[in-house]
Each structure stands twice: as C-alpha cells, then as structure tokens.
Amino acid sequence: MLNDGDNLYLRVRDTGKVWIYRYTKDGKRIKLGLGPYPEVTLAQARAKAYEANSQRANGSDPKETRDRSSLSSRLEQRTDTAGLAIPQVKLPMASPESESGNTTEGLMSCIYGLTPTPAPP
C-alpha cells in the first residue's frame, strides 16, 4: 500500500494496481475502491478521494452513498424477459387509523385495478 495522503492509497499486487480510499467508521477500517491504475489517473483518484472526504465531513458514509446510487441505477436498468422496462409500482401506505393496512385486496386493486367484491350477507 503506497500512501498518497488524505486517505488515498495505491494498492500494488501481482494482479495489478488499484486506487483505494481507506477510512474508519465505528472502529472498523473501511476500504473503498476507486478504480484500477492506470485507467484511473492520479488526478482522478485524488478528486474521488476529495469527494469522499467531503461526504464524510458532511456526515454521510461514502461507501453507503456509492452502494445506494449503484443499486438505484441497477433498478432503473432492470428489464423483464421481453426487453420491456418493468414499471415501478408505488403502493399506498397504510394510514394510522386504518385497521387493515396493505391487504391483499388493496395490493390487487393497486396493481391490477381490481376492486374486491363484498362478501355475501
């Protein structure tokens, strides 16, 4: 591990060189990969490390932020087997005064536009 300062390191192994941003959270050492060298230049790695330092100064975890944005981008790109985009359905939240909450009937009406038939008397 070659230290460049400001928690930026170049990890050198037989398999290649990788930029790593290291920091401590809750007593644990966290490593955040910034990309392989030479595809990611020193200037780019320093800019990414500066951004991660800024995020930590603002109280957010850079690794969690990256994972969250990666997950959201993967969900946006997700397609079904026919190649059509899967619509995102937002389910109504149960109100505090509601007894049943999100029931099967409520989900069916939300997704398929079905309304439950009343039970016979």
Image: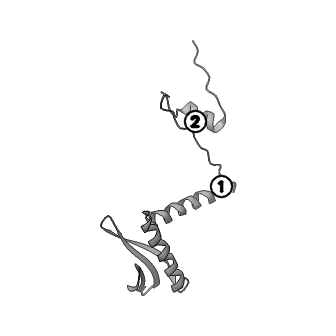
Q: Position of residue 106 (x, y in %)?
A: 57, 32
Q: Residue at x 63, y 39 (%)?
A: 111
Task: State the separation of the CA atoms marked 1 and 2.
Answer: 23 Å
Residue at x-position 53% and y-position 87%: 38
Say few, some or many: other residues with alpha carbon within 10 Å of mark 1 (under 14 / 14 to 19 / 20 or more): few
- Residue ranking furthest to the front: 58
Give the number of the disc on residue 106. Answer: none
**106 vs 93, nearest the viewer:** 93
Residue 112 locus on image (x, y percent):
65, 36
Q: Residue at x 70, y 54 (%)?
A: 84
Q: Secondary structure at mark 1?
A: loop
Task: Look at mark 2 in the image and give the residue it sits on.
Answer: 107
Foreground of the two, 63 or 38: 63
In the image, residue 12 sits, relative to residue 52, either above or below, namely below
Q: Position of residue 96 (x, y in %)?
A: 47, 32
Q: Which mark is residue 81?
A: 1
Above or below 68: residue 2: below
